[in-house]
Amino acid sequence: MAGHRKKRKPMAEINVVPYIDVMLVLMVVFMITAPMLTEGISVELPKLTAEPVKVDQKEALVVSIKADGSYYINLGAKVDKAVKLDTIGEQVSKIIRAKPNTQVLVRGDKAIAYGRVVELMAVLQKSGVPNLGLITEPEQ
């Protein structure tokens, strides 16, 4: 019985190394593409039954857009003259650096184009405003 060979048992293990490699590649792809999908300004949309947010009027920074397209910055009771969109970012950035917990609110006339409000919000976001609120009138 010199030619007798031993029978091998079939291997019942799964080699998971290739699956780990595929998973890591997919994870890298999702990590790179996810920030590209969330481009823009994050805004929490209001609901009809939402309760009004309590705002300290003395500490709130309100940026207003009138129907004629002019911008105004109001800090507390102080109302400034009309300001250009280019200078709003600089002024708001200085205020946020001095007082990081300042609430920033946007007050826009209903006749103003939505694009103008979005431009203002983008400027405020670039100036370092972490959270932005929108002022509206309650429904009667």
Image: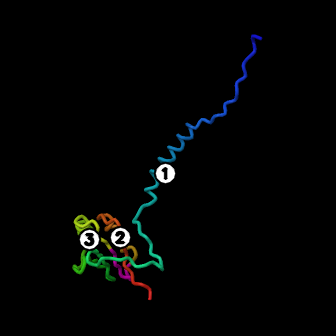
Which three-letter amino acid code belongs to the residue tagged 3?
Ile
| Magenta stretch holds residue 108 | yes
User: Would you call the spot at circle 2 few (<14 residues within 10 Å), some (14-19), or many (20 or more)?
Assistant: some
Q: Which mark is residue 6?
A: none
**In the image, is 28 to the left or to the right of 3?**
left
Q: Which mark is residue 132?
A: 2
Q: Quadrant of residue 139?
A: bottom left
| Magenta stretch holds residue 87 | no
The quadrant of the picture occupied by the C terminus is bottom left
The quadrant of the picture occupied by the N terminus is top right
Camera-side mark, 1 or 2: 2
**In the image, is 78 to the left or to the right of 1?**
left
Residue behind mark 1: 30
Which three-letter amino acid code belongs to the residue tagged 1?
Phe
Q: Position of residue 132 (x, y in %)?
A: 35, 70
Circle 3 SS class: helix
User: Would you call the spot at circle 1 few (<14 residues within 10 Å), some (14-19), or many (20 or more)?
Assistant: few
